[in-house]
Amino acid sequence: MSRLILASASPRRLALLQQLGYAPEVQIANVDETPHAGEAPEVLAQRLARSKALAVATAYPKDLVLAADTVIALGEQAFGKARDAAAAYAMYEQLGGREHQVFTAIALVQDGQIHSHLQSSSVQLRALTDQEMQAYWASGEPADKAGAYAIQGLGAIFVENLQGSFSGVMGLPLFETARLLSRCGLPPPALTPAWAGSV
């Protein structure tokens, strides 16, 4: 039986898969995440998810390899991880009080074939005060997050509205991921066999 390989260093993606009963092996994909010139945020997310999955799949041809990538976007501007406090504050200034998009792409490689899906959510953050920006960055939570905030953590207090997938904003949309894995013969262990007949 094929194993599930998670091509991601994200502890949040691992925890979300474990929430469904999966116990994936983690293999980190070394992929250049630099956006291409003029590349739309949703295209960037899909390209990186596919690149990560394919990079790891070469070493695991008989297994299911799952990867994902999340990009925060305000219009055509993509927001990655903040390199320092100043970059994070600039993101909060731009995102605060405005609705932005969160694109999370998932890619699954099985027997050399790649299956993918793009999930989009809309999030509105309230404007942060200077003191809140400083205190939030100092908490350490935003350092490795796209857009420099975590909806599942302290950052939730800044989220005025969410339309879409909470887990997708976290980094792995569970509905779409479970459906994709089920269609490839690996339904969520926590619901097997009940789930298998419902997709």
Image (spheres, rainbow, N blue to C red):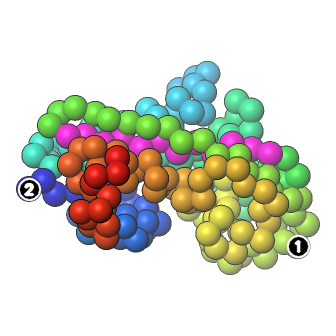
Tag shown at residue 131:
1
Image location of residue 130, percent across then percent down: 89, 67
Which mark's residue is nearer the viewer, 1 or 2? 2
> Sequence order check: which comes first, mark 1 or mark 2?
2
Q: Residue at x 64, y 65 (%)?
A: 150
Q: Is residue 68 left or right of residue 57?
A: right
List the residue tagged with mark 2: 1
Q: How many marks?
A: 2
**In the rendered image of this protein, does residue 183 appear above or below residue 144?**
above
Query: What segment carries the magenta color?
Result: 99-110
Percent position of residue 66, x then y = 31, 49
* Kind of residue sitting beneath label 2: Met
**In the image, what residue type sits under mark 1?**
Gln
Dividing the picture into quarters, in which one does residue 3 lie?
A: bottom left
Residue 188's quadrant in the figure?
A: bottom left
Q: Which quadrant of the figure contains the N terminus?
A: bottom left
Q: Residue at x 86, y 59 (%)?
A: 126
